Amino acid sequence: MIDLYTWRTPNGRKVSVMLEELEMPYAVHPVNIGKDEQFAPDFLAISPNNKIPAIVDQDGPGGKPYSLFESGAILLYLSEKSGGRFLPEESRARHDVLQWLMFQMGGVGPMFGQAHHFLGAKEQVPYAINRYKNETRRLYGVMEKRFSEHEYLAGDYSVADIATYPWVGRHERHEVDLADFPSVKRWFDMIGARPAVQRGMEVPPDG
């Protein structure tokens, strides 16, 4: 059993989508970041950076409980635990997936997140808004070119797609019209039609 500590964010939903795709049993523990629950001492013991998501694998390495934080690390751990699903074994294909996963971790997530923040901030800072909106659109352009030439980010459906989809799911919040990026929209609609993705994107349910 996996204990998943999460909230209604793209990073949190990466992991619930992955768990649903793997059909791996898990228990959801909501951590309401709007109420600063991520700063509770018991959560800090699991996630030293006070960020969701985090997991505790009750049957971790050596059969002992193992806690893990950082969404990218969790995706790779779950892939390994499942025998390598959604991450190829062959070196070239594996690193194709890993580089696009790092593209999400180092680019899509942080930049889209900053666009969300400054566009929705009470104090409007034009320089910051323009900087992060422009970088967000640049990253969409990178994905548009990729998806115009490839069905998925790297080879077959992989952890890179699982990591990126929830962030693109907030395109309206960073003021991007997917009609401007038709290849991204084709990919987004295809991923969103997967039943496991639909289930994972509802964890924890909005309310």
Image: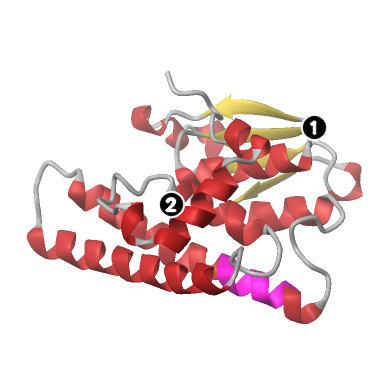
Q: How is the image coloured?
A: secondary structure
Q: Quadrant of residue 120?
A: top left
Q: Residues within 10 Å of mark 2 (few under 14, many from 20)?
A: many
SS state under label 2 = helix
Q: Quadrant of the N terminus?
A: top right
- Magenta stretch: residue 39 in it? no
Residue 50 visible somewhere in the drawing: no
Q: Residue furthest top?
A: 207
- Magenta stretch: residue 96 in it? yes
Q: Residue at x 68, y 58 (%)?
A: 157
Q: Residue furthest right?
A: 62
Decide which of 135, 63 is in the foreground and name it.
135
* Residue 147 left/right relative to 177: right
Q: Quadrant of residue 29?
A: top right
Q: Is residue 68 above or below residue 144?
A: above
Decide which of 3, 170 is in the foreground and name it.
170
Q: Main secondary structure of the magenta part?
A: helix
Q: Tell me the residue that label 1 is attached to.
A: 1
Of the two numbered discs 1 and 2 in the rendering, the one whose residue sits closer to the viewer: 2
Q: Tell me the residue that label 2 is attached to.
A: 168
Whole-number angstrom distance, CA of label 1 to CA of label 2: 29 Å
Amino acid at the residue labelled 2: Val
Residue 122 visible somewhere in the drawing: yes
Q: Which residues are magenta?
A: 94-101
